[in-house]
Amino acid sequence: MTDHFYHSHQIVEERCKGRMKCLHVCPTKAIRVRNGKATFITELCIDCGECINACPENAFIPISDDIEDISFFKYQIAIPSPVLYAQFSPEIHPGIVHQALKNIGFNEVVDVYNMTNELGFVIPHHFKTNSFPKPLIISYCPTIIRLIQVSYPNLVNLISPFDVPREIIAKEIKKTYPKKLGLKENEIGVIYITPCPSKIVSIKQPAEKERSWIDSAIPIKDIYNLILPQILEIQKQENIEELKEFQYGSGWIALENISEKLGTERCLSVSGLDHVKMIFDDIENSKLRNIDFIEALACIEECLGGPFCVENPYIARHNSILLKKQYGHKQPFDKEKALNKYKKGFYSLEHSVLPRPIKYFDHDIATSVKRMRQKERILMKLPQKDCGLCGSPTCATFAEDCARGDVDITDCIFFSEKFKS
Amino acid sequence: MPVDQSISIKKIKESLEADVIVGDDLTGVSAKHIYASDLMSDVLAYGKTGSVLLTGLNTIQAVISSYMAEFTAIIFLRGKKPGSDMQKFAKDKDITILSTKADMYEACIKIARIDGNLPITEGVPIHTKEEDNITSHEFKIDGHDFASAGMVSTQIKSILKTIGYDPLIIRRIAISTYEGEMNVVMHAIRAKVTLNAGNKEIVVIIDDEGKGIPDVERAMQQGYSTATEEQRALGFGSGMGLPNIKKNSDLLNVTSEIGKGTKLEIKFFVK
């Protein structure tokens, strides 16, 4: 197995007790427990973070950048995911969160809100004036993009041709700030504050471009600990009114944001990987004939349920609603300018997303067909209990592993020597 | 080593001077193929149904693998005798066990010389039938079961993806199977779906019990539909079914008998 794919987590072997919680939650069946320790098949992993959430021993640890790792940038700009604001009660003004980020060392904080607004205008314009394959999948969730690459290679041509707000805003910063500040591009660090590991992967190894415009990503839970004391401190000050120049939109972290603008009657919004897979299966069967757009997010609570979030997702959603009510008034933006940028392709994906080539059995179809025959033959005789004690998630995957020659049939507890004696 | 025709186990026993460990009656037990190996993963991966295994591996794994690979008998070499747990397992699963003093090379040659019908020099023709290159899978659909409609198509898709066919052909098969499945759900009582996937072509056969199609030619025309108002209200029955299958497949063969049922044979050529 090649290490060709970057992943945002690693397994700490000493911690893993082989409890198999991860085995059963993995949506692409990438995990195997071998010799009592969890391992994963790198080309199947779509970085959803389910294993990180499921492991009782915290054996899956996210690989993320530390705040110290970014200190070498001369000018540091934080782009917080709107999820960050919803981690705090609505009494804490987002302006205070910005100030707290500056107190811990960021030179500037830039919101994705304006870019979300621009895209909310440009995307519907594009679809009114262009023909496109239907239904189009709009997703700013890197896990969904990877799910398509791995499990639904048929659907790559349905991925929306627009880039996501965080990337576009980082691009804008990288194009305009060096001149503004008199610095080199590589002296300006753009750091995303992320609710989930999958965005780290999309920054380290993007599916749709050579290199991300964002330099680094720090998990919300890491930032939270650093800014919380700052926030409490700032709140005590008297002159906090001036910090409150701010607009809030839940933006792309929640569903129905885009569909609102495209006309909800032709849109379908879905979250949670199991549900997303149901919808993708329907697309492959050509069942969804009256739907033009699909919005999909991997986490069931949308981005507020990301593995790096601190607050309970339901409370976070409540906070988000209240924030939107208080600060959600729209700021006007230059539509002419946005249209100009659109014509120049500023918002477009840099190149299209391709399927990830996966070899389950063999590159040669004839050999693969033979393996499939063996797999079926073995599967018929297995107990079909999907207990996972063999280390493969289901009897079907165990039969597949057997047919490939990766495991022995006696690894199945129902056929093992220990069980017989 | 494949054998062209079956050899009775009795003849093998005689030629190897083997003892019978498990199996009361050897009549009717025969070897379609001989497979000689100590590696059980190879047995599972390459062994053919109806083979006899020659092995020196005296562990339960040998018996279990033979059972999995649907072998009829095991011959243990160099005088090895299986333990009681292995014997019991073999007895339960109806697998004959012999034991011979010969080693693997000697045993192979002796079997090859039975009746003098097999060339023992190099270039033994590996006899593979066309059906060995196809994997078959069967599914069932119940009529009027709208809740499960699409399940078979999704399962078929997952098998084809695992084998690793081109995504485009998988898409065409998914659409065709789904249409066929919907036809069964709407019009028939039940159906058996067979997927035969090979390296040259993929065939989906949907064989239903139902009222049949009175005029197949008309049903192949776009827009012709016999769906009820209720079914149309659910978004089905737009008269797209058969024409859409035809459009997406390389070859479609429809046979129908009134009052009995309809059989669709849908073919796709693997390039």
Image (spheres, coloured by chain):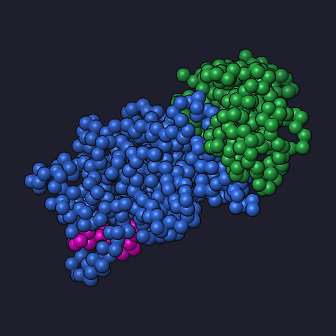
Q: Is residue A301 above or below residue B107?
A: below
Image coordinates of residue B42 in percent, x first then y, are 62, 40
Image coordinates of residue A162 in percent, x first then y, are 36, 42
Q: Colour of chain B?
A: green
Q: Is B48 or B235 nearer to us in this picture?
A: B48
Residue situated furthest left in the rendering = A182
Residue at image coords 31%, 56%: A112
Which quadrant holds the C terminus of chain A? Answer: bottom right
- Visible residue check, residue A311: yes
Residue at image coords 74%, 35%: B51
Residue at image coords 59%, 49%: A407
Residue at image coords 11%, 54%: A183
Q: Colour of chain A?
A: blue
Q: Is A53 or B77 nearer to us in this picture?
A: B77
- Visible residue check, residue B247: no
Q: Is residue A83 magenta?
A: no
Q: Is B63 or B14 nearer to us in this picture?
A: B14
Q: Which residues are magenta?
A: A86-104
A411 to the left or right of A118: right
Number of callouts: 0
- Where, by quadrant of the figure, is residue A244 drawn? bottom left
Image coordinates of residue A171 in percent, x first then y, are 25, 48
A244 to the left or right of A37: left
Q: Is residue A103 magenta?
A: yes
